[in-house]
Image (cartoon, rainbow, N blue to C red):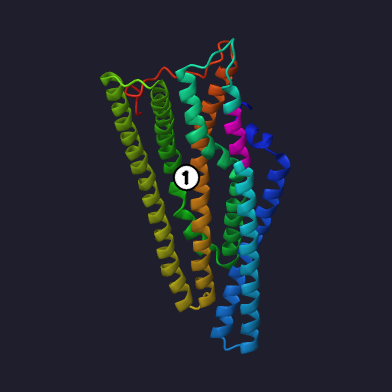
Amino acid sequence: MPKSLFGFVFLMGRHHQIAIAALSVVLFLAGTAPLEVQRRIINAATDAAPYQTILILVLAYLGLVLLEGLTKLLLNIYRGWVGEVAVRWLRKSALAASEPSSEAPIDAVAEGVQLSIIIAEAEPVGGFVGTSISEPLLQAGILIAVGGYMIFLQPLMALAVAVVFLPQIGFVPLMQTAINRRVETKITVMRHVSQSMVQHVATNDALDAQGARVERLFSLNMSIYKIKFTMNFMMNLMTQLGYAGIFALGSYYVVTGRTEIGTVVAFISGLSKIRDPWGELIDWYRDLRVTQVKYAMIRDARAASEAPGGAFINDATTATGATEA
């Protein structure tokens, strides 16, 4: 297996990633145009323009929305297919590595790790392959296109919107690092659970150990939830501050005659267009960091299976002793 996660992504098909990236470019370009059409519809209505003109603009808006929706449908199906190909490859790789050999018999530890990889670990890693390049390209493209459009319409209002997103650049990486540490510990605990199930040991000590591992998983998951949803709360708060800035500054500009109502409506829609890709970009970053941890553990397990002795790596960290740093 390639050493890095993105090495694995390209192993699964460079040409597919190029095609997906091209669809992403088409999608973010198609998603920006409706903002300008929407602004023109509002201004045409408030300026008492002929209804035929408004109807043509509405039809153009519907056409752009249809193009955006169909492109997104095709992109999602394509990304899903690429991701499933990667999942299938990982599962078959784990199965091939566990084939019995006279030189390297498979023990319960190896079978437990193999079971964990096939059932739980392969899917999120393989699924990330489909979105690894197209997702940041798509969402960053939308942010740049919509942000540039907003700057063109009203630079000061665009600056007010941009300011509220700056704190997220600081707290998101810190909170994600804390999540990653817990995810790595969680995978280790899951492998010990699988190992114990394969061994079929039913002593009181073994059952107590499994119970302790289940409690450990509960504690880790709750810790991840707390950090994740606190992060979401802080991001949503920043977004609402952006809306407040648009309402306050936009209303002042309309009252003083420095802008038109259509521009304020376009900014409100534009912030919605920015909020979603910004959130998706943060989600992609979180998935990237977590998937890098998971991929490294799968890669190390596979490397250990190919080493002399032929057994999957046995993490020495115990289920109850792993730290929740």
Find out whether residue 297 is within the magenta segment.
Answer: no
- Foreground residue, 46 or 31? 31
Please state, as top left, top right, bottom left or bottom right, where the N terminus lies in the image.
top right
- Foreground residue, 136 or 127? 127
Q: Secondary structure at mark 1?
A: helix
Find out whether residue 92 is within the magenta segment.
Answer: yes
Is the residue 61 above or below the residue 277 in the image?
A: below
Please state, as top left, top right, bottom left or bottom right, where the C terminus lies in the image.
top left
- Tell me: 80 left or right of 175: right
Q: Residue at x 64, y 69 (%)?
A: 64
Which residue appears farthest toward the right when viewing the image? Answer: 15
- Foreground residue, 139 or 213? 213
Q: Residue at x 68, y 44 (%)?
A: 17
- Tell me: 88 left or right of 222: right
Q: Amino acid at mark 1?
A: Ile
- Tell me: 59 left or right of 116: right
Is the residue 155 above or below the residue 179 in the image?
A: below
Predominant SS of the magenta segment: helix
Q: Which residues are magenta?
A: 85-94
Q: Quadrant of residue 11?
A: top right
